[in-house]
Image (cartoon, rainbow, N blue to C red):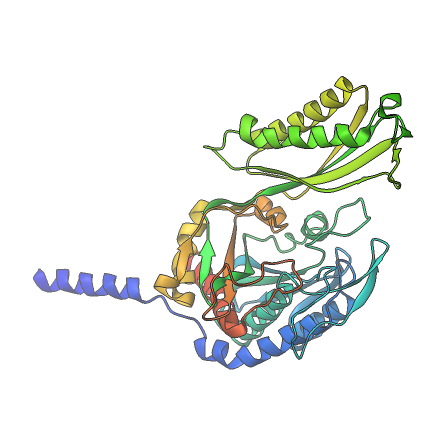
Amino acid sequence: MLNKVYLLIVLCSFGLSAQTNYFQSDVNAIESKVIEWRRDFHQHPELGNQEFRTAEIIAKHLESLGLEVQRNVAATGVVGLLKGAKPGPVIALRADMDGLPVTERVNLPFKSNVKVEYADQTTGVMHACGHDSHMAILMGAAEVLAKHKNELAGTVKFIFQPAEEGVFGEGKAFGADLMVQEGVLENPKVDVAFGLHINSQTPAGHIKYKSGATMAAVDQFYITVKGKQTHGAYPWSGIDPILVSSQIIIGLNTIISRNVNLIENPAVVSVGAINAGNRHNIIPEEAKFLGTIRTFDLEQRALVHRRIKEIAENIAKSAGAVAEVTIENGYPVTYNNPALTDKMLPSLRTAAGENNVLEVNAVMGAEDFSYFAREVPGLFFFLGAMEHGKSAAEVAPHHTPDFYIDESGFKVGVQAFCNLVLDYMKMK
């Protein structure tokens, strides 16, 4: 009897420790290619829905691996389908493709010198959010998994998505939203979706995650205040839309401090731009300003929207002006399915190291991976790329000209994707 109990303990212990980094030698071997792809993408960034060169490189790579490839999905997106030798679940792995209208200041051998006309201005284009690394990591995972397709019990759908940062001047669906509308999660039907985002303020190779609501819903508001134009020397002869706008902006800041229950969830209302007038001695007829809203649940979202309209319209009315408010819904909350997150944490810990995976608070940034995770259970995590020896306060944040990432943690991202795929397939 004791021997049987001992045997049972040994078998259980073996099962608990049998978690492994799948195809680790292949992951290590492909690291240099992943870095090379990333540097090429970094040097040749393209804005949303203009990722023509980028998409062709990705599509040719996936085709070279023997995958079924779809081009021009949701404008410039690419989807590759890898069918394993055995039946099983369909797993989506996603990377975004677009750069940003940011002029790079980092002096790299592969620095971007691309210039474009954007919003009536000449600007540089830069992978200032790390999408170049996302694509390279997913290309690496595709190559490793394709090499071992006979060991896969299921299907992997590699989704390379355009326009995560948005498309300027187009009032229609784009990016993940459009991909979902075009059926990217169907034929075959996706069971779960995994995605990652590089983070310049997390140590290279470390992983951060959060179960449940992970990244905020993002909405945009546009307010036009209409007053009465007059000479700047005689303000009593008109209605000053600049003054009214300033009062509205102060009022909007009370929404977070006085209306939102911050014990339950944080929220943000920020004004990002204000434009009015063209001369020092003319009070103009109207002023316009715009901003962003970040929330974490539907009731909170509705409350903030309602209060923005009430505050703007009533403050303007009290001054004899009129405020026209437009609120556009953006990305929904990025939500990590709690059950899926719990199941897959061992896969992430094995890839990065037990002590290098940390649960963190929700962040106010937004991500259109949320559209995938709204349709199927999803897990979205953050991969560290902070330069060794630096602190988060010392390094440049995302979306800035000085954004820089350490490439040494890329293979952890490739390994994490491989682990997630194999472990999930073994669970089914």
Q: Is residue 383 above or below residue 229?
A: below
In depth, the one of 259 and 363 nearer the eye is 259
Q: Is residue 87 visible?
A: no
Please tell me which residue is depicted at 73% across the width and 67% down the height of the picture. 45
Number of callouts in the render? 0
Q: Is residue 7 above or below residue 146?
A: above
Can you tell which quarter of the image residue 71 is in? Answer: bottom right
In depth, the one of 396 and 328 nearer the eye is 396
Q: Is residue 178 visible?
A: yes
Please tell me which residue is depicted at 13% across the width and 60% down the height of the picture. 5
Q: Position of residue 419 (x, y in %)?
A: 45, 65
On the rendered structure, is 172 left or right of 81?
A: right
Q: Position of residue 25 (x, y in %)?
A: 45, 80
| Quadrant of the frame with the N terminus | bottom left
Please tell me which residue is depicted at 75% across the width and 31% down the height of the picture. 245
Can you tell which quarter of the image residue 326 is in? Answer: top right
Q: Position of residue 155 (x, y in %)?
A: 56, 62
On the rendered structure, is 233 left or right of 315?
A: right
In depth, the one of 264 and 273 nearer the eye is 273
Q: Position of residue 93 (x, y in %)?
A: 57, 60
| Quadrant of the frame with the C terminus | bottom left
In depth, the one of 293 and 55 nearer the eye is 293
Q: Is residue 373 above or below residue 19?
A: above
Can you tell which quarter of the image residue 255 is in? Answer: top right
- Residue furthest toward the front? 233
